[in-house]
Amino acid sequence: MRWKRRRFLFRIWRKRRQIHSVLDRTGDITPTGIICFATVRNEMLRLPYFLEHYRRLGVTNFLIVDNASDDGSADYLAEQPDVSLWTTSHSYKLARFGMDWLGWLQWQYGHGHWCLTVDADELLIYPDSDTKGLADLTAWLDQNGTSSFGALMLDMYPKGPVADAPYDPGQSPIDTLCWFDADNYRDKPHPVYDNTWIQGGVRERMFFAEAPDKSPTLSKTPLVRWHWRHVYVSSTHQLLPRRLNHVFDMQAHSKVTGVLLHTKFLPNIAAKSAEEMIRVQHFENSVAYAEYHRVLTENPVLWSPESYLYEDSKQLIDLGLMSKGDWV
């Protein structure tokens, strides 16, 4: 595993010249700053609320790579006083879905900081996150000798056809995507990286029922006290060193965990899926994933009578989708 980690770090070092600085405000990062890292492409629909949500939680600096957006995302980000921006036109897929680019930024600017790595369609919540910020959570994790924090990716969706749901930029996506699957998840230990591998949810129910083992991985470790030797292996699903992956306790719920409210199914999902079928940048050459994107272009209904209407973080704790552990 040590040699594997070194190979990933060497790969990150080689890819560093694929990203080009547009605005560098990293000099504003303070010793206690909490940094958010993200790669985006054509996310103007989500960016206003994305930034608002994480600013409210206490993120102090955003380090973002824009992958050749043509919808104004880069211009909008450049106007934000707490955003440092890089751009690239290179392949997202060949950069390990952006993790090589972000890995270089984490290496250069994340060392010693609590670093949050998320996609533009992921909104982190955790127990009492409506009253306690990330500074409170990370201080508690520090006090307990914990260097990483896990979260379940929870797909949110509307009640009717996905492309027909009303949504305006700047609005909370959860006003539109307010339903979720609550009780169709399963977990097992990953045989190589020791992380808890969670699958299920609405995407498995709707798109991978015939091939559940190919359904998306829903367990992530988005928040880490970073060291320059750390590296993400596959998105934020797995890290090296492996001890950083020990973030879930699905039986006793002894560890505090969060949820990433996944806002993938906003009304632009059909157009994005049609584009992805051409670009093929977000998945490996899999027939199952190609069919998944094809069905999304047909404006499906994801809701079922077993769907739950989202209320708050306490509801997700009661349903066992996140846990409070000893966090008070």
Image (spheres, rainbow, N blue to C red):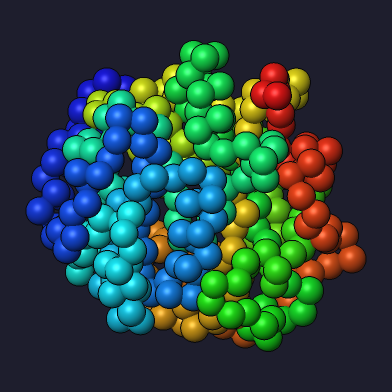
- The quarter holding residue 321 reads top right
Residue at the location (18% across, 54% down)? 24
Q: Position of residue 141 (x, y in %)?
A: 53, 22
- Front-most of residues 248 and 124: 124
Residue 217 visible in the current orientation: no
Left or right, 292 with respect to 284, comes to right
In-front residue for pair 237/60? 60
The total of numbered circles placed on residues is 0
- Figure quadrant of residue 8: top left
Give 318 or 4, whichever is nearer the viewer. 318
Q: Please give left or right for residue 219 compared with residue 85 in the image.
A: right
Q: Quick check: can you spot residue 84?
A: yes
The residue positioned 56% from the left and 34% from the top of the image is: 150
Asked if residue 45 is positioned above or below residue 29 in the image, the reply reads below
**Residue 140: percent from the left, percent from the top?**
56, 21
- 182 left or right of 145? right
Quadrant, the C terminus: top right
Image quarter in which the N terminus is found = top left
Q: Residue at x 81, y 45 (%)?
A: 315
